[in-house]
Amino acid sequence: GCMRMFFLTENGTEQTIQFALENWWMTDIEAFNKGKKATLSVQTIEACELLAIDRPSLEKLLTIHPDMERYFRMIYERAYSASLSRVRYIFQLSKEDFYHHFSTTYPEFVQRIPQKIMASFLGFTPEYLSGLRGKRGKGGKKG
C-alpha cells in the first residue's frame, strides 16, 4: 500500500513531507535514533501490511546480521537524497514545473494519492493543484 508522513502546522494544517510505497521504509528518523517522542505522524493512504521494529531490536538484528547494515544505509541514503532534491526543486522550479517534474518522475504517486494530500506535499492548495491538472489535461504547458 501507500503511506505518508506528515506534521501539523501551528494553525492545524496537515503538511505532508514524505510518501512511501510497497517495500519502502518510513519513520520519524530523529525520534527513532534519539529515543524521543515522535513529532511526525505516519498514515496509511491505502491498505498496507506493515512491519515495525524498535531501535533495540534493530541494533540486535544488525549485530546478528551485519550485512543488513548496508541495506538500511541504502534506505537512508535514498530517503535523504529524495529530501534534498525536493527542497532544491521547491526553490528552483516554478510551481507548475515542480508539479510537472514530480508527476513525470513519480507517476505512481500521482495516480494513487488523493489530491488534497498531494497538494499538501507539493506546497499547493488543493484548488491550485486542481487548476494545474485541468490545465495539463487541456493541452496546457508541459514543462
Image (tube, grey):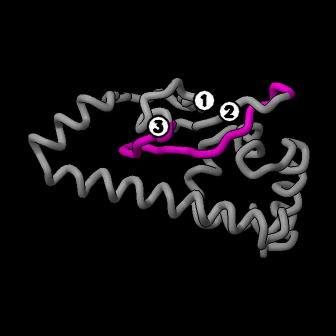
Label count reads 3
Which of discs 1 and 2 lies nearer the camera? The answer is 1
- Which amino acid type is marked by label 2? Phe
At 18% across and 43% down in the image, what residue appears? 62
Mark 3 and mark 1: span between their CA atoms?
A: 11 Å
The foreground one among 48 and 4 is: 4
- Structural crowding at the residue carrying mark 2, measured as other residues with C-alpha within 10 Å and reported as few (<14), some (14–19) or many (≥20): some
Q: Are marks 3 and 2 in contact (CB under 8 Å)?
A: no
In terms of depth relative to the viewer, which is nearer, 128 or 71? 71
Give me the residue at 14% from left, 50% from top: 66
Q: Report how far apart the C-alphas of labels 1 and 2 lie in the structure.
A: 7 Å
SS type, badge 2: strand
| Disc 3 versus disc 1: nearer the observer | 1
Q: Is residue 51 left or right of residue 62?
A: right
Q: Which quadrant does the C terminus fall into?
A: bottom right
* Label 3 vs 2, first from the N-terminus: 2
Q: Is residue 111 above or below residue 16?
A: below
Give me the C-alpha separation between circle 3 and circle 2. 12 Å
Marks 2 and 1: in contact by CB < 8 Å?
A: yes
Where in the figure is residue 128, as x and y percent of width and height? 89, 50
Q: Which residue is mark 2?
A: 7
The answer to whether residue 108 is above or below residue 127 is below
Residue 27's tag is 3
Where in the figure is residue 2, as x and y percent of width and height?
A: 51, 38
Q: Which residues are magenta?
A: 11-30
